[in-house]
Image: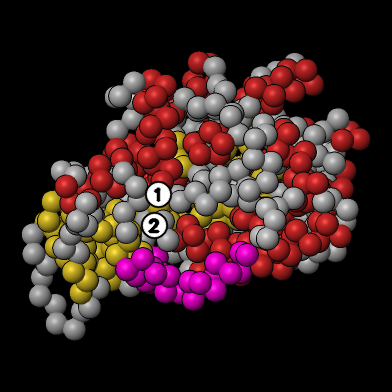
Amino acid sequence: MIIENVHVAPVRGPEIESGYLRIEGDRIAEVAAGPAPDLPGVPRIDGTGCLATPGLVNTHHHLYQWASQGLAQDATLFEWLVALYQVWAAMDAEVVEGAATAGLSWLALSGCTTSSDHHYIFPKGRGDLLAAEIEAARAVGLRFHPARGSMDLGESKGGLPPDVVVEELDDILSATAEAVDAYQDPSFSSMLRVAVAPCSPFSASAELMTESAVLARQKGVRLHTHLAETLDEEEHCQERFGLRPLDYMLKLGWLGPDVWFAHTVHLSDADIGKLAATGTGTAHCPSSNGRLGAGIAPVSELLRRGANVGIGVDGNASSELTPLAGEMRQALLFQRARYGPDALTARQALELATLGGARNLGRQDELGSLEPGKLADIALWRVDGPFTAAVADPVCALVFGPVPPLARVLVGGRTVVEEGELRTLAQDEAGRAGVRAHRRLTKLAQERGFTAAVQIHPGH
């Protein structure tokens, strides 16, 4: 395939105002300026009026939460979690598959080609929840990095979550090892890799954190957890462990180039230095942090000090209907609001959403930039609309404004989105799968007696 007459923003390397990309199999064979070569029989996509970027990489999500959007709208993180834990305890594999189908489709429709997912609630007797979301990712056609999450620190042991949503340590470690063995594909073109991901310092014991790190390193997979999201969490760690969240992670052996944390809103200067020095990554989720009033992560300073930062939309229950591409704009505006107009550029925001995310997932050699030899995961943004075309810089049009229409999304050279429409699944049916998941979860929660948390608008 050849994509021609296109403005190329490769993320790494010089931009090309008018050039082409040549794809062979699932990889990029050539990126060059000027007219494309005449190769008889090779399909051609006319990219006139389009901006080509690497496919976006989502490095923090909770797909099951698609089924619980719009609840606890004015709560802090801890209040929001307490309101929703019991609702989530009612989910089953049917809920998860429908929510993941809608959530991943929504991501694809905003230029995402690779998504992680942090699933950390596994109610007993509710089916194989991890397999359900993996099947959804296969159907949508995105590269998928499920992070097998876990919680073992319930209320009875001093944790935040109710005991009904936590698991026993031995069960967690066994299930996590089985998930890695069953699904991890380390190949260059992999569509599926697994991470090990205890949920947070206030829901996972020190033993679970340390044993998970040992397991992940024995299996050669990555580690992920929430960290330093709110001041409540910082106070919890100080009171329970006598340490700030990042120092607690350091004590447990959780800093290193195989680790990425979600959020990292509340960091000291010393924390930033430790992240940079150890090669530990972070996933910035600006809309969710704003929705929950958690604060603004010091992304500009992390980048200035050499730490890696990617982008995440976070779970849809704290980031309703957030498009991944829109998080570039949110990140840019939040940083500028806090630090000034030169705090983050449009091209830095694009790098967060592409190469920064690829680094978080350990896939910087395969994904995140448009270079020969890398996988052909490409987003083509239509920036020639009657309003958009007035913006002098196509990358500015992508990042500063509303998300422009997508002409094409390719994953390994395969079309997933074309002219703003999902091509791997019936788009409306994918959306309805999410509606059914929402209605089913609401019904299951109400059957368990948790009606207050799932009050919905009359007639909905």
Residue 358 in percent (x, y) is at 43, 48
- 404 displayed left or right of 217: left
Q: Which numbered circle lies on residue 295?
A: none
When asked about the image quadrant of residue 289, the answer is: top right
- Which residue is at the far front? 458
What span is colored magenta in the figure? Answer: 411-435
Residue drawn at (36%, 26%), measured in percent from left and top?
336
Please state which of residues 265 and 372 is positioned toward the viewer in this rendering. Answer: 265
> As displayed, is residue 408 above or below residue 38?
above
Residue 337 in percent (x, y) is at 39, 24
Residue 428 in percent (x, y) is at 51, 72
Q: Which numbered circle lies on residue 111?
A: 2
Q: How is the image coloured?
A: secondary structure
Q: Which amino acid does label 2 sit on?
A: Gly
Q: What element carries label 2?
A: loop
Residue topped by disc 1 = 325
Q: Which amino acid does label 1 sit on?
A: Ala
Q: Inspect the magenta stretch and tell me whether residue 21 lies in it.
A: no
